[in-house]
Amino acid sequence: MSKTNNLSHALERFLSANIQQHMQRNAKIAKAPKINPRKKHEMTQFQVGNTYATRSMVDYDCVFSFTIMARTAKTITTDVHGKIVRRGIFTYKGVEQFKPFGTHSMCAIISADDRSIALAAEAAAQ
């Protein structure tokens, strides 16, 4: 055999092996479950009547507690320093949150997770 025949034969084997690997990889991808990024996942939400708490960024012993009086899809109503106020809700990692004192560099953020409920119960017991 000539060198050109050897090269063309080697090239054919190389290409067919790569095509087979590519087809196998695509078959595995096709079998994988499809995830819809737009599908709404379970979210931890604020419940009316529950009390949630967080610690101050500046003083660990300072605990801010808030009871949810009412809610809509986008806002909650709570008592801040004796005034009834509405605050917007945002979501972080599947958990609803709100900023009771507004947005600033070290603002308190109240989350709707179990840790916030447990901290509120602990603060109420003291």
Image: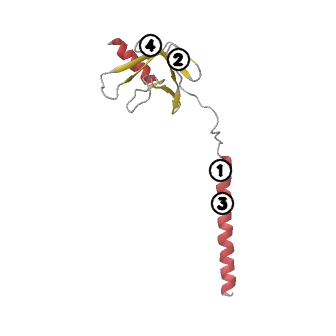
* Number of numbered discs overlaid on the protein picture: 4
Residue 85 in picture, x, y percent from top left: 48, 16
Say which of 50 and 26 sits in front. Answer: 50
Name the residue type under label 1: Ile
The residue that disc 4 covers is 83
Badge 2 element: loop
- Write down the quadrant of residue 13 in the picture: bottom right
Q: Residue furthest bottom?
A: 2
Compare marks 2 and 4 and give the one earlier in the sequence: 2
Q: Residue at x 66, y 82 (%)?
A: 6
The residue that disc 3 covers is 22
Say which of 87 and 124 sits in front. Answer: 87
Please, is residue 11 above or below residue 86 in the view? Answer: below
Residue 66 in picture, x, y percent from top left: 43, 17
- Write down the quadrant of residue 79 in the picture: top left
Q: Quadrant of the N terminus?
A: bottom right
Residue 71 in picture, x, y percent from top left: 55, 17
Q: Residue at x 44, y 29 (%)?
A: 103
Mark 4 → mark 3, Cα distance in angstroms: 64 Å
Residue 44 circle label = none
Which dot, 2 or 4, sits closer to the camera?
4
The answer to whether residue 59 is left or right of residue 17 is: left
Badge 3 element: helix
Give the class, few, some or many, for how many residues have Cα within 10 Å of label 1's Cα (few <14, many ≥20): few
The residue that disc 1 covers is 29
Name the residue type under label 4: Lys
Compare marks 4 and 3 and give the one earlier in the sequence: 3
Please, is residue 121 above or below residue 44 in the view? Answer: above
Residue 113 in picture, x, y percent from top left: 47, 24
